[in-house]
Amino acid sequence: MKAFKLGDAVLVLDENLSGVITRIDGDLISIETEDGFLLDFKAEELVKNKSDKTLKNELFSHSNIDTVISEKEQPKKKASKKVKAKERYEPTMEVDLHINQLVKSPKGMTNHEMLTLQLNTAQRQLDFAIKNRIQKIVFIHGVGEGVLKMELDYLFGRYNNVKFYDANYQKYGLGATEVYIYQNVAPN
């Protein structure tokens, strides 16, 4: 522990304050600032005010000072948000073709009506994506018996400006097809 005595000139750590010790009460030290304010600090918050050269020699060796200065002078790198390669190519549009996503209740609908609604929705969304220059779209169709997937493959095959393939297995499992739209080809 530092030995302070009345009348010592001190500096306050982590603040731009200095003063003279006017009272010592155990670990609590009162100082009077140059402006005449009386402030209390703990002993560990104060250091004796010595000349700059003496203080530097006491607190740091030259190698420590050089290290600290070089660390402070190095420019800070800006934290840039890294986008993973696979996220960069994530589809911008998803269309869930599960029947319960398209109607409030499928009660009373035949399988043919449900399939027709799903295919019309897929065609409308694909045309929307082409018109709005959306490059990738994922159609979530589920696994089931594969009828909807087969019909979607037929629908997508009628477009000359798209290619389609199974979507990311980790994200969608087997129940989704991703469509890539070539933007420089005129639609059918």
Image (tube, rainbow, N blue to C red):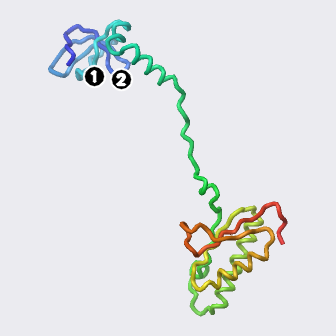
- Please state the horizontal and vertical placement of residue 50, each as a whole percent of the image: 32, 8
Q: Are marks 2 and 1 in contact (CB under 8 Å)?
A: yes
Residue 14 image position (x, y, % from top left): 35, 23
At 66% across and 69% down in the image, what residue appears? 178
Secondary element at image label 2: loop
Q: Which residue is mark 2?
A: 14
For the residue pair 75 and 52, the one nearer the viewer reads as: 75
Residue 176, x across and y down, in percent = 61, 73
Up-down relation of residue 145 to residue 165 (above or below): below
SS category of the residue bearing label 1? helix
- Position of 47 with respect to 28 (left or right) is right
Name the amino acid, label 1: Glu
Q: Residues within 10 Å of mark 1 (few under 14, many from 20)?
A: some
Q: How many marks overall?
A: 2
Q: Which residue is mark 1?
A: 45
> Quick one: 136 or 154, which is closer to the camera?
154
Real-space Cα separation, disc 2 to disc 1, in angstroms: 8 Å
Q: Quadrant of residue 187?
A: bottom right
Q: Earlier in the sequence, mark 2 or mark 1?
A: 2
Q: Nearer the viewer, residue 188 or 125?
A: 188
Say above or below: 49 vs 141: above
